[in-house]
Amino acid sequence: MRHFIEELEHLQQKLLEEAGLVEAAIHGSIKALVERDEGPAQDVLRNEARINQLEVEIDETATRLLALQHPMASDLRLIRAASKINTDLERMGDLAVNIVERALGLLQQPVVKPLIDIPQMASLVEFMVRSSIDAFVKRDADLARGVLASDDAVDDLRDSIYQELIEFMQRETTSIPASVNLMFVARNLERIADHATNVAEDALFVIQAIDVRHGRELHADEKAG
Amino acid sequence: MRHFIEELEHLQQKLLEEAGLVEAAIHGSIKALVERDEGPAQDVLRNEARINQLEVEIDETATRLLALQHPMASDLRLIRAASKINTDLERMGDLAVNIVERALGLLQQPVVKPLIDIPQMASLVEFMVRSSIDAFVKRDADLARGVLASDDAVDDLRDSIYQELIEFMQRETTSIPASVNLMFVARNLERIADHATNVAEDALFVIQAIDVRHGRELHADEKAG
């Protein structure tokens, strides 16, 4: 087995590779939606298997490091964070696939225009995903806190999108199937933002050794002890 | 620190306590919906904090066991499965809260009757959740496989519910806000079923030391090696 430090580096490299594919999937799913273009949709569907494969590989590496190396303190914290981020990234990939499926459904339906605030919501969510990963990679607590602070704006955008779509469906009943698809796109974007928030929390856990979930702020040393 | 075997037992007991609360939350959320009763809805909202607290406690216990005990092979596998099941249970609790919020919204709206196939879908999903936990506790592979096999039926029910609701919205535009709420209830139930499927996969991982995710069947010894 390679040296432990090398293995940890390898784990983080794989995670970055996965993050890159997931960011591309989210971007492609929105591009397919906005430009009504099947090309990027097919790219996303093709890359899903690679994301799933990376998830399994990262999980295997993390297990091996835990089982054979008995990491302590900060290394243990890093491996556990990597393992959680891995799960969140894989779910974001699934959600991008859900968006692609809705985008493909919308290609068969009359255009609902404008796409309400969905492109704006997508930009914010993509920014959150990128920032959460950057926060982890660069150990940048401010960046992570910025992601946590953006979550309310995403919820507000989702609420206004739902409201506009409901009013639109009431005015134009022929738009109902397309509007339902758009509603689920907004819901999937909101969930991607939730996963980005999880990643930002895991980044903070590594950086500051605090657990910010559920409003608790415990020192990780206290937790691990 | 207590003896390792005792600690493992304690971990599983906590997980069972969490599972019991989550099952009650799912049941209460559907009861609030079907009976248009605010009582069970308030119970679910009250119990959410306890589920979140248990999730943090279980996570802390798992970290401590990993950090201080250096578990190998089957114990490591058990702790990792418990840790994943913990995450899935907490998310199921969140989804039950989402259903409660939709149920409370529906109380302000005219009755959409019948509730299409939602009660039937809910029964199947509750059965899956209970079976996935039982499969883990009793190390029962058949039960776990039964959960995996039920997932297609859930997806079929969801599709027919969506279809019926879209047709209903087109016929009765005044029902649109209530129908949208019901659509999200069906979506939340489907996601609870997905998490039950994850739990069943983790149960199988512990029982048979195989990884059934993403269609791969690897021996865990091979993975950990």
Image (cartoon, coloured by chain):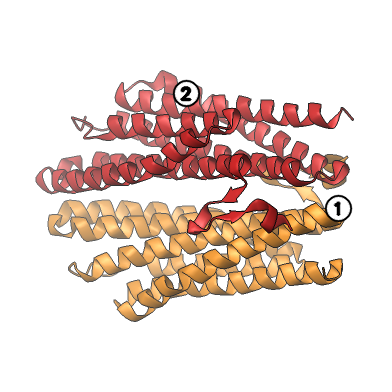
Chain colours: A red, B orange
> Tag 1: residue type?
His
Vertical arrangement, residue A24 with respect to residue B208, above or below? above
Which image quarter: residue B188? Answer: bottom left
For mark 1, what is the residue?
A: B70
Vertical arrangement, residue A178 with respect to residue B130, above or below? above
Q: Residues within 10 Å of mark 2 (few under 14, many from 20)?
A: some
**Residue A8: image x %, image y %?**
75, 32
Element carrying mark 1 = loop
**Residue B176: image x %, image y %?**
19, 55
> Tag 2: residue type?
Gln
Q: Nearer the viewer, mark 2 or mark 1?
A: 1
Residue B115 seen in this snapshot: no
Q: Residue at x 55, y 24 (%)?
A: A20
Write down the chain letter for disc 2.
Answer: A
Tell if the residue under mark 2 belongs to the same chain as the one under mark 1. no
Pointer 2 with pointer 1, Cβ within 8 A: no
Q: Residue at x 66, y 63 (%)?
A: B58
Of residue A135 and residue B203, the one placed in the foreground of this image is: A135
For mark 2, what is the residue?
A: A42
Does A198 sit left or right of A82 as displayed?
left
Of residue B87 and residue A165, the one placed in the foreground of this image is: B87
